[in-house]
Image (cartoon, rainbow, N blue to C red):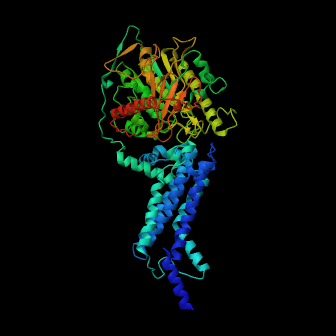
Amino acid sequence: MAMESDNLETRGASRSLLSGRDWIYLLSLLVPFVIYDLVLKGALVFAGTGDPGLLGGLGLMRSDLLFNLGYVLLWASLFALTGRRSSRWIVVALFHVITMLVALITTSAYQYYKVTGSTLDSDYLYLWLSSPEGTGGAIASEITPGILVLLSMIVAYVAVGPAVVTRLVLRWRGRSGGVGVRTPVEVSWLRIVGVGLGAYALLSFSLLPGGSSTGASKSFSRDAFVNVVMTAAQVAESEQLPEIAAEPVAENPPAEASLASTAGAEKRNVVMIFLESTRARATTPYNESLDTTPFLDALAKKSLLAEQAYAVVPHTHNAIAATNCGVEPPLDRWGTMLLGAREDSVSSACLPELLKERGYDSAYFMSQSESFERSPKILENLGYEEFYSTDRMETEGFEQTNYFGYEDDVMLEPSRKWLEQQKKSGAPFLASYLTSAPHHDYLAPSERYGRKEFTDNDLVNRYLNSVRYEDIFLKNLFDQYKKLGLYEDTVFIVLGDHGEGFGEHGRFQHDNVPYEEGLRIPLLIHDPKQFQSGATLEGPVNQLDVLPTVTDLLGYEVKGGAYGGSSLLRPMRKDRTLLFSCWNESGCLASLKGTEKYIYHFEDQPEEIFDLSKDPAERRNLAGQRSPEELEKRRTELLEWRAKVNSKYGMQSSE
């Protein structure tokens, strides 16, 4: 009877691809892995803001289902292929390492989407690996104790879970031993090849996005790990990674530009104040129902206020480059890296350099850490002579505003000392300030100035209180200039570097938000010698217009070069088109002609057109009412602009 039982077991095993022990070992890891992956994706699909319905939801999860089935068959075929050979241990090691990697990427992608509303791609992972000091704070701010525990459990279970489970199951069944103890069982090569081909087919089909009827992006409808792999493959195939040593190629570069005096030239001081992550509608001048910025509101009534101002790229250093240099900034994260890696990264003479030739000194103050994207080097390359970050300031007694910044008032003391020196020297100056308060993760300091209740949404309320705090800093800074006797001889430019999204279109923060909440910013020119009764500019303008406006205010003409913007003091062209780019590589492009805004998402989701005069919240997509020829014309215009700008920075464009 014992011999007959053994024969039956042997015949049963021969019909199976793997031994019972191997199946236990594999499935003890793969079953929890598959469940975990599908639960995370299901939570995003069915617990999100939209309701895709059952069929739509399953369509959005099709790639995940196919990937997980293919992943299970892949490892089953590899285990069967290696049998009891010495190479089995290599496969077992790869099984653990790759499954752990996939689980960690899936977890990261889930959290990234929850925080930003965008899908995780290989570009962000590369950015993190190449510049951990710039992205580490953002990542750390989202790692809660619960997430740490979860990640620890994933690592621990993937490492030892299958061995422990297998041993326990075998003991329960009255057996003992580990993987590789049983007598090898011959398995048909045809069967192994068939399972391998099945795995290949399923994994291949998982590359295709589903759920097209829901309107979700293609990247979202793919499995998270599949999307990361696909974007990495696209980078490798198209060689999109920037060549740091590449030479910029610019047509008629304005690098030799200089300022020539006119009859009304005055050597007055210039102050530019960049309001971090401040969308126009979060401030009182642009939204009377919000009392977040009473000082800015009072200032606007004695200034030239641009009613419709935009960032070119919704990212800080790109915005600072556009404003200071008057030309299109790098359009994505790779270009931002180049700003701090190459001295000739900007082909134009920027405002600090132009004014230096007229006897101006320059300084840049920021209430953030200098580790943010090589800030000191970037500002040096833009022409600033002195640089002050929180690393060089006394931060004791100041609360943190986010993971890399302190209360904006931390800049007041170093500003006072520098201004006193400037006053003694008698030299005119350009001073720029970058606030930090409204940047994610919106800690909203409360000890110094308290908090107000603007909304019952905690996240938005913290953001609006951060904008309020920024306004208090503005008042304190203006008071400082008045106290030092510098106010009357100074021209002030107050503007946002970019806006901030809170899910109005499913996206959060700013880098990948091409809608009004991400691009539209406050912008005003305050000159104590004019605009005291207030003035407004209705037409759309952007950050490229600041440099020609400043030179115009000071009474200078730009000679020897051409910049992309127009002075806000002169009539604007009525046929003007503004062009924009998301910071994420191949994330989105947009253009504004008159009141009509077009958004191109690089085939990741449908094109969009909004009439801002009738639909300022961008809810009614009119793209379906436009001809294919019109859409192609708008799309081609953006892609040609992108290629031209990228060539100026020595970068290739991909479509």
**In the displayed structure image, the side of residue 308 where residue 632 appears, left or right:** left
Residue at 48% across, 18% down: 491
Comparing 266 with 337, the one in front is 337
Comparing 250 with 445, the one in front is 250
Q: Is residue 155 above or below residue 174?
A: above
Residue at 42% across, 36% down: 376
**In the displayed structure image, the side of residue 426 where residue 623 appears, left or right:** right
Q: Position of residue 488 (x, y in %)?
A: 51, 14
**In the displayed structure image, the side of residue 224 where residue 547 appears, left or right:** left
Q: Quadrant of the C terminus?
A: top left
Q: Position of residue 573 (x, y in %)?
A: 44, 16
Q: Is residue 91 visible?
A: no
Q: Is residue 492 visible?
A: yes
Residue at 59% across, 32% down: 619
Q: How many marks?
A: 0
Quadrant in the rendering for residue 196: bottom left
Q: Position of residue 177 (x, y in %)?
A: 52, 80
Q: Is residue 328 above or below residue 186?
A: above
Q: Quadrant of the N terminus?
A: bottom right
Q: Position of residue 414 (x, y in %)?
A: 50, 30
Q: Is residue 146 above or below residue 406?
A: below
Q: Is residue 312 above or below residue 220?
A: above
